[in-house]
Structures are given as structure tokens and as C-alpha cells.
Image (spheres, helix red, strand yellow):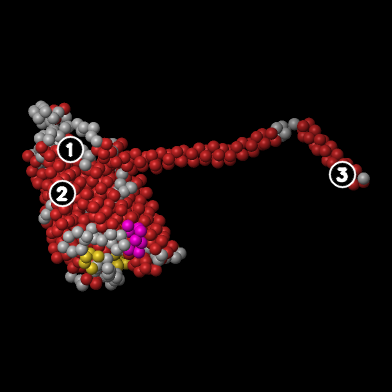
């Protein structure tokens, strides 16, 4: 197994000649967008068939994507990057932007992932949301989510990408807060929306910098002119793009919204974490590779953010008892691996996307498995109230196990082929900074060990060990299980289990299939470029062995604590670190102290200044004018004698003035 070194990078330029099959590419966006429009406009009349119509639109988009993908495979490598101009969009002053699609291996990878996994989630949701009175609206939002993500990854300019970027933000807000009759769910949706808007400022700033520097915002023009731009400008642009990626992909320091986003229905969580939303930040960094390669400082910050986040998310995941929030922390950590790889430059671009694809399968499978557990346990999410469910939910148990082994990186499951490549890439030495290999490679290794612990904890607490739920027999295990509501766990219907089985197959074999013969790296080469081979600072076999050793150690520790030992229904107080991890390492406290409270005080001060000074000043002036008017009005009383006296007084004053002036002149 060899590594990539950024010695020589070549990227295939985009062609404007659109091959025949590529002409169907707009349907990728039109079909799910049509599904959303029909379901929203048809109203209650579509309640009976709306869910399956949403499934059909997503499935049809996958079929179109598969056709375009197969057509691309038949083309020579140097013809696989195509800019498909659709229509003139914005012409204002010096800005001329056309709406168009960039069809290349990177965008098609995302198209296949979004539509295939998205369609499976749609099918699963048919059964999961069966009894929801607003199921039609839910599927409309799912279709809108898929359409917005496809706009994002297919756009040929940063401005059109921004349209999809905001569409994804809107759809996530609608879906996270779908059950907004619960105040905490509505607050969670608002939190996700606001924090993503903070990140969006970065993308807006990057757009302005590009237009001011290059006079354009399309990928082709920007990337062609990057070599002529100053390092300072590229650094500022790269950091702005990274801010946007941090918001959308829940990376440090904008990661606080992701755990609360579990408020939405479980299919939403699966879609956000596996195929849309959080993957957008990784796409943005890899797509903007020329910008980051011209800004080494920004590129280093990307790696630092990825390393910090992968450790941060892993530590938080160790203390979560909510099964969905534990998986959310896992997503934060795994996206951190991808961001770290993307920051390594050509050495890591392909590996970042490789892990994104495999993660899409095993993480979607585990989220759907969590939804299946909730379905069988009366919407319970507390893992302290699970235990021993493998005897009652065998399909869920086995499919979840495939995802668990994949995320641990156990050979030959998918995560071994993708995550281990990132760990090896992190250990590749960098000229002038050999310490980076040990720092970032060490962080990736530590993250793998912690991941093995908290994901094994989740798996063991849910499916193995003794039951910790009340089945009506009383407290037979001495764990206090009788104090909860009676549960009768059961397997989910086939519409829920079949998508889980398909995703489990991907969790097992997809990584090996894509890694064989460097198939996936070669596929992305027209976009990510070719780089020469190089070895990490440690032999590859030793890195693999060390990674597996840490993984097995984390697994064994979790086995001892959560299978051999009794798991209490009520969580103990724990250590200082445990208490901090339960509160997400105080990320909400920091945000509240540093940003929210000062923002409230600033807002109140501005409101006070506006009312007392601005409004008060103008109202005072108006009052003065009113009082002068009242005083003058007193002279207009309607009596002739008063007017005569006034006229006489005026004449006396005028005469006195004239007399004084005359006397003065004569003197």
C-alpha cells in the first residue's frame, strides 16, 4: 500500500462539449424538485400516494444519475470533466454568471451517493412515518433536500453552489423542526439554522473576494486565475471557505448544532449524516483544492480543524446515552477525518471522498438501525434502557453490526479501506515540517482507538448484555428495569429492514471494491489530480497493526465495562471529563457566554440607544415645536380688540425703531 505525495498535480480542464447522455443531467435536479412541488401544492389530495411519489422521484433521479455515470465510464479520462451551460442567469455590471452544471467524477460520486442512499431512506420512511398525519409534507421536504444537495454538487460556479447551499440549510431547518409542536424540537431547528448562517457568512465573503479579484465566480475562471493571485488573498478566501465548511459539516467551532439536530424524525438524521448536509463541507474543500493549494496557511488550518474535531467528537460520543446523539458525535468525528484528509492536499483529496462514500453507507445503516430500535422500543432513545435486543431484533442487530465493524475499521469491512488510508496519509512527512506527520497522524490514531470504544459501547449497550427495560416481569436482573414503561421489542417491517440490509452489504464490501487496484483514486484523478507515490514515516504494515491494536483495545475496554459489568439504568456522576463530555465539552456554555449573552446585551444597548437617544431626540424636537405652536396659538384668540392692541403695539415698536435710527443718523 503506497501513499501519495503532492509532487506533481495535473487536473483535467473542463470541456464545453456536452456528450449526448449528459444532456439528461438537468433531470437529476428537476425530478426531486418536481416531487417537492407536486406534494406541497397538491395538499391533502396527495396523502394516499404522496409518500410513494416522493420515493419514485428520488429513485428516478438515481436512475438518471446511473445512466450518466455509465456513459462517463465509456469516455476517455481527459473527456470526463464537462461544463454544461444551461442559460444566462445574472448580468449586472462586471458580473456575468450563467447557470450551468459541472459534470465530472467528483460531482457524479456525490450524485450517486445522494440519490441511492437518499432513495433507500425514502423507502424506509414510508413505513417509519406511516401513521404521521403530515407524511406527505415530510416527503416533500425530503425531495427538496435531495434536490438542493444535487444543485450544490452539480453547480459549475460558487454562486449557483450557494443556491444549493442555502437550499440544503432551508430543507434541514424544515425537517429538523418537522415536529415543531414540541418546543425543544423547534428550538433545535432554529439553532441549526442560525449556526449554519454563521458559516454561510464565510461563503458570502469568499464570493465577494473572488469577484473583486478575478471578476468571476465560476470554477473555470477562478481556478485558472488562482496562480496569479497573491498568497494573502488566497489565504483569506480559503479561510472564508473553511468557515462555511465548518458550519455545514459541524466542524469545530461550529459543531454545537449537530447533536440537537437529532430532534427530527430518524430518516432525517440518516439523510443529514450520510448523504447530504454534513458532507457538503467536505465537497466544498475538495472542489476548492486550487485555492487551498495556493494558501498553505489556510490548508494547515483545515488539517488542524479536522484533527481537533475528530478527537472532540469522539470524546463527546463516549458519554452520550441517547443512541442518536452518540451517532451524531460519531458523524462529527468521522467528518473530521475527511476534513483532515482534504487539508493534506493531493495526498488526501481522494481518500477524503473515499471515506465519505463508505461512511455514507455504514452511517446511514446505523441511523436506520437506531430508528428500528426506537420503533421496537416505543421511541425510547436512552441506551441505558436497552440491552439484550439482539434476541428480539435479529435483522436490526446483524445489519447494525456490519456498520459497527465498518466504522471500527475491522478488515475487510469498508471503513478499513477508507479510514486507514487517511491515517496513513496523515503520517506522510511534509518538507520543512516533519512534526506534522507525528501530530496529525497521532491524532488520527488516537481517534481510531476512541472510536472503537464509544461505538462498541453503543453496540453493546443496545444489543448485548442483560435487559434494562421493563417487560412486565419485574426487576429480575436487579437493575431497576421495572420502573420504566412496559416494552415489547419487536423487529421492524420489511420496508424498514430491506434498506438496512442493502446498506449493510455496502458496509461490508464497498470499501474493498473501490480500493481494489486504486479504482476509486483513479476515478477521481481528473478532478483531484495525479500525485506521485510516497511512504509514511512508519512502515504501512506497522501503521495497520498499530491501528488494529488500538481498535481492539477500545473494543475490549467497552466489552469489559458494558457487557461483563452491569450497566446501571441511572448514569453515575462520573469523572470531570465524563461530566464535561455529557455536556458536549461545554460547547453550548462557551457559545452562550462568548457570543449569545454579549450579543443580547449589545442588542439591548442598541435598542435603548435607539429609543432614548435617537427616538428621544426627534420626539423632543417635535415636542418643542408643538409647545412653540401652542404659545403662538394663544395670540390667535379671535378678539378684534386684541388684534387692534397688537397692531398698535407693533406700530409703536416700529415708530420707536425708526425714531431711534433717525436720531442716530442725525447725530
Q: Quadrant of residue 537?
A: bottom left
Q: Is residue 124 left or right of residue 211?
A: left
Examine the rendering and report whether any part of residue 621 can be seen: yes
Task: Looking at the image, tell me whether mark 1 or mark 3 is earlier in sequence order.
Answer: 1
Q: Quadrant of residue 486?
A: top left
Q: Quadrant of residue 566?
A: top left
Element on which disc 3 rests: helix
Q: Main secondary structure of the magenta part?
A: helix
- Quadrant of the rendering where the N terminus is positioned: bottom left
Mark 2 against mark 3, which lies toward the viewer?
Answer: 2
Q: Is residue 644 above or below residue 504?
A: above
Q: Is residue 366 left or right of residue 435?
A: left
Viewer-nearest residue: 227 or 224: 227
How far across and down, in percent of the image, does residue 619 sit? 58, 38
Residue 271 inside the magenta-drawn segment: no
Name the residue carrying label 2: 551
Viewer-nearest residue: 17 or 113: 113
Span highlighted in magenta in the image: 293-300
Q: Which mark is residue 661?
A: 3
- Quadrant of the rendering where the C terminus is positioned: top right
Mark 1 against mark 3, which lies toward the viewer?
Answer: 1
How far across and down, in percent of the image, does residue 513 sit? 13, 60
Identity of the residue drawn at 14% across and 46% down: 553
Q: Residue furthest right?
A: 667
Badge 2: residue crowd in 10 Å (few <14, some 14–19, many ≥20): many
Badge 1: residue crowd in 10 Å (few <14, some 14–19, many ≥20): many
Name the residue carrying label 1: 383
Element on which disc 2 rests: helix
Element on which disc 1 rests: helix
Amino acid at each position: 500500500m503506497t501513499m501519495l505525495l503532492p509532487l506533481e498535480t495535473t487536473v483535467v480542464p473542463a470541456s464545453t462539449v456536452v456528450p449526448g447522455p449528459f444532456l439528461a443531467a438537468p433531470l437529476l435536479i428537476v425530478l426531486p424538485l418536481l416531487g417537492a412541488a407536486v406534494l406541497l401544492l397538491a395538499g391533502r389530495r396527495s396523502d394516499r400516494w404522496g409518500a410513494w411519489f416522493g420515493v419514485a422521484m428520488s429513485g428516478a433521479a438515481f436512475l438518471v444519475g446511473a445512466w450518466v455515470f455509465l456513459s462517463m465510464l465509456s469516455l476517455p479520462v481527459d473527456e470526463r470533466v464537462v461544463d454544461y451551460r444551461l442559460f444566462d442567469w445574472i448580468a449586472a455590471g462586471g458580473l456575468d454568471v450563467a447557470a450551468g452544471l459541472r459534470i465530472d467524477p467528483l460531482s457524479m460520486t456525490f450524485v450517486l451517493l445522494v440519490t441511492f442512499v437518499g432513495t433507500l431512506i425514502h423507502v424506509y420512511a414510508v413505513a417509519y412515518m406511516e401513521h404521521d398525519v403530515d407524511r406527505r409534507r415530510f416527503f416533500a421536504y425530503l425531495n427538496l433536500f435531495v434536490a438542493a444537495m444535487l444543485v450544490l454538487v452539480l453547480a459549475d460556479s460558487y454562486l449557483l453552489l450557494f443556491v444549493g447551499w442555502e437550499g440544503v440549510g432551508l430543507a434541514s431547518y424544515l425537517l429538523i423542526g418537522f415536529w415543531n409542536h414540541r418546543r425543544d424540537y423547534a428550538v433545535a431547528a432554529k439553532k441549526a439554522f442560525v449556526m449554519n448562517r454563521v458559516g454561510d457568512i464565510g461563503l458570502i465573503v469568499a464570493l465577494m473576494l473572488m469577484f473583486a479579484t478575478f471578476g468571476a465566480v465560476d470554477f473555470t475562471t477562478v481556478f485558472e486565475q488562482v496562480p496569479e493571485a497573491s498568497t494573502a488573498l488566497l489565504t483569506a478566501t480559503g479561510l472564508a471557505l473553511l468557515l462555511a465548511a465548518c458550519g455545514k459539516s459541524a466542524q469545530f467551532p461550529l459543531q454545537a448544532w449537530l447533536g440537537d439536530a437529532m430532534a427530527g424524525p430518524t430518516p432525517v438524521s440518516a439523510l443529514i449524516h450520510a448523504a447530504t448536509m454534513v458532507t457538503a463541507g467536505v465537497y466544498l474543500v475538495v472542489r476548492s483544492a486550487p485555492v487551498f493549494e495556493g494558501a498553505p496557511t489556510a490548508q494547515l488550518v483545515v488539517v488542524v480543524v479536522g484533527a481537533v474535531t475528530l478527537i472532540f467528537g469522539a470524546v463527546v460520543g463516549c458519554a452520550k446515552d441517547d443512541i442518536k446523539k452518540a451517532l451524531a458525535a460519531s458523524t462529527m468525528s468521522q467528518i473530521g477525518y475527511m476534513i483532515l484528509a482534504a487539508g493534506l492536499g493531493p495526498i488526501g483529496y481522494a481518500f477524503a471522498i473515499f471515506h465519505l462514500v463508505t461512511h455514507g453507507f455504514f452511517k446511514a445503516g446505523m441511523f436506520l438501525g437506531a430508528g428500528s430500535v426506537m420503533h421496537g422500543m416505543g421511541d425510547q432513545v436512552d441506551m441505558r434502557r436497552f440491552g439484550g435486543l439482539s434476541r428480539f431484533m435479529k435483522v436490526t442487530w446483524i445489519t447494525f453490526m456490519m456498520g459497527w465493524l465498518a466504522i471500527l475499521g475491522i478488515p475487510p469491512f469498508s471503513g478499513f479501506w477508507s479510514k486507514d488510508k487517511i491515517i496513513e496519509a496523515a503520517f506522510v512527512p511534509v518538507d520543512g515540517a516533519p512534526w506534522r506527520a507525528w501530530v496529525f497522524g497521532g491524532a488520527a490514531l488516537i481517534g481510531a482507538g476512541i472510536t472503537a470504544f464509544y461505538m462498541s459501547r453503543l453496540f453493546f449497550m443496545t444489543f448485548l448484555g442483560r435487559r434494562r427495560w421493563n417487560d412486565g416481569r419485574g426487576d429480575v436482573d436487579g437493575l431497576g428495569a421495572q420502573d420504566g414503561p412496559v416494552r415489547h421489542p419487536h423487529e421492524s417491517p420489511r420496508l424498514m429492514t430491506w434498506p438496512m440490509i442493502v446498506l449493510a452489504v455496502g458496509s461490508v464490501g464497498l470499501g474493498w471494491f473501490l480500493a481494489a487496484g486504486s479504482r476509486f483514486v483513479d476515478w477521481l484523478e481528473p478532478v483531484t489530480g495525479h500525485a506521485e507515490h510516497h511512504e509514511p514515516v512508519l512502515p504501512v504494515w506497522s501503521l495497520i497493526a498499530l491501528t488494529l491494536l488500538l481498535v481492539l483495545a477500545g473494543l475490549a475496554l467497552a466489552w469489559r465495562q458494558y457487557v461483563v459489568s452491569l450497566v446501571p439504568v441511572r448514569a453515575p456522576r462520573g469523572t470531570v471529563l465524563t461530566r464535561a463530555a455529557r455536556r458536549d465539552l461545554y460547547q453550548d456554555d462557551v457559545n452562550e457566554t462568548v457570543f449569545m449573552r454579549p450579543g443580547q446585551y449589545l442588542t439591548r444597548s442598541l435598542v435603548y440607544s435607539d429609543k432614548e437617544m435617537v427616538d428621544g431626540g426627534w420626539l423632543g424636537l417635535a415636542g418643542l415645536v408643538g409647545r412653540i405652536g401652542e404659545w403662538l396659538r394663544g395670540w390667535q384668540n379671535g378678539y378684534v380688540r386684541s388684534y387692534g392692541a397688537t397692531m398698535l403695539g407693533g406700530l409703536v415698536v416700529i415708530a420707536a425703531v425708526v425714531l431711534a435710527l433717525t436720531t442716530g443718523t442725525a447725530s
